[in-house]
Image: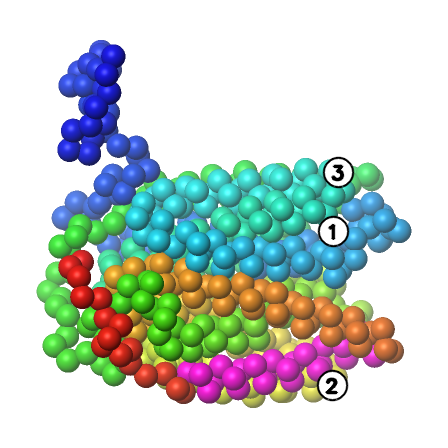
Amino acid sequence: MTIGRTAGILKMPPNKHNRKGYMTASFLDRQHTVAPPDYNRFLVPPAALAVHLSIGQAYAFSTFNLPLTKLLGITHSAHNDWDLKQVGWIFSIAIVFLGSSAALFGRWVERVGPRQSMFTAALCFGGGFIVSAVGIHLHQLWMIYLGYGVLGGCGLGIGYISPVSTLIKWFPDRPGMATGMAIMGFGGGALIAAPLSVLLMDHFKTAVSNGVLETFVTMGVIYFMFMMIGVYAVRVPAADWKPAGWSAPAQPKPLVTSAHVAVEMAWRTPQFWLLWVVLCMNVTAGIGVLGQASPMIQEIFTGRVTPAAAAGFVGLLSLFNMLGRFFWASTSDYIGRRNTYMIFFLLGIVLYSTVPTLGHLGYIKLFVAAFVIILTMYGGGFATIPAYLRDMFGTYQVGAIHGRLLTAWSVAGVLGPVLVNYIRQYQIDHGVPKAQAYSVTMYIMCGLLLIGFLCNFAMRAVDEKYHYRGSL
């Protein structure tokens, strides 16, 4: 029996199931996702949303922080339970591997297409919950670091970038709006995950379990199945496709190129590294607070905010994180990406500088309102950056460039929570009340936003020497 290849198709011996002797490529292969000429491009964002809403659960992981410190004590932290600093590293590790996997697998995602990469993301993210559940059962924190942190983090990274270049190619006329529609799902994932986590933990809670283990298993299965909807539904446009009646503008807008830059060349430009710092500073200023949102509001307003209300706060932040992604990314199509980031940094500095005063005076509503606005800009930064990259480097390999830029998210994923957690603990250890232990961090965030503002202000068009000269 012989097996050969003809025109890229695997040739098999004829049989009753394979009359012509050919086996078509896998359902996951890129050629099986090319859309027919009459395909409605607005069906693609919901497929991306199915993945991003799932992996957006990461933003609600803080709802597990306190329960994970009470696995043995059930209602309180026992002697051998983990502390909040140890548990806080789970989220940070996941974000590190989000950026690392996005950078490492960016070119692979471009090559194999969104369906195969989204399927891989579903396996990693769902599997991360299951491995972590085993770690909870054995009370081995390193297994949770490995499961949710490493494996789940890879699912986050691959799943995050999988639809980006596809959406930009489907919407060359509105790239900000297109990426905003999908990436808003990542910001909104916690809106579903936060109350779902609390509900499941309450449902599974017994005298010998606080319900975290069973919740992890359940969520791993649910998210894998939901992500598979996106895997089935996603499509890519044909090579010569463009929107009906649309043509590229003869005179591009300022800081919007009509050329292309390959990923290996983009890596060497000053613009890439300016954008890297811009994203890192914007993310650091929000991710530390978001990762610690539930315990933070309970400690700042001790006795006035219940765990259920804190979960609601996390969900509210998630809602505005999600809405901000669509709003600011769409707005950037009209006012430009650079101007959009100028607003993020200047307004962010004003709000972060007022947060300690609001907490000290006990103004819960104004405190929540300030963070709601901050989170719209935090989410808007994520949704706007792919279109910013497209403006600077063109559409060729923009997904891979985006993947490498997300290493800034990895750094911010460590820097942000470390600033919040360790400065908080340092101040508490030196006699500062818990309600005031976050103030210094807020002023540090203002300094980081100022650095981001200066880098964004320095942005200029990419020099022609970096442009791609080959055929696309």
Would you name the residue on which mark 1 appears?
68
Q: Are marks 1 and 3 in contact (CB under 8 Å)?
A: no
Q: CA separation, marks 1 and 3?
A: 13 Å
Residue 45 location in percent, x, y?
33, 55
253 sits to left or right of 45: left
Identify the element where label 2 is drawn. Answer: helix
Q: Earlier in the sequence, mark 2 or mark 1?
A: 1
Q: Amino acid at mark 2?
A: Leu
Q: Earlier in the sequence, mark 3 or mark 2?
A: 3
248 sits to left or right of 160: left
Q: Which residue appears at 27% of the width and 67% of the height?
A: 261
Identify the element where label 1 is drawn. Answer: helix
Would you name the residue on which mark 2 appears?
361
Residue 256 location in percent, x, y?
25, 77
2 sits to left or right of 263: left
Q: Earlier in the sequence, mark 1 or mark 3?
A: 1
Would you name the residue on which mark 3 appears?
138
Identify the element where label 3 is drawn. Answer: helix
Does the magenta portion include 451? Answer: yes
Q: Amino acid at mark 3?
A: Leu
Q: Nearer the viewer, mark 3 or mark 2?
A: 3
Q: For the magenta stretch, what is the residue range?
A: 432-456
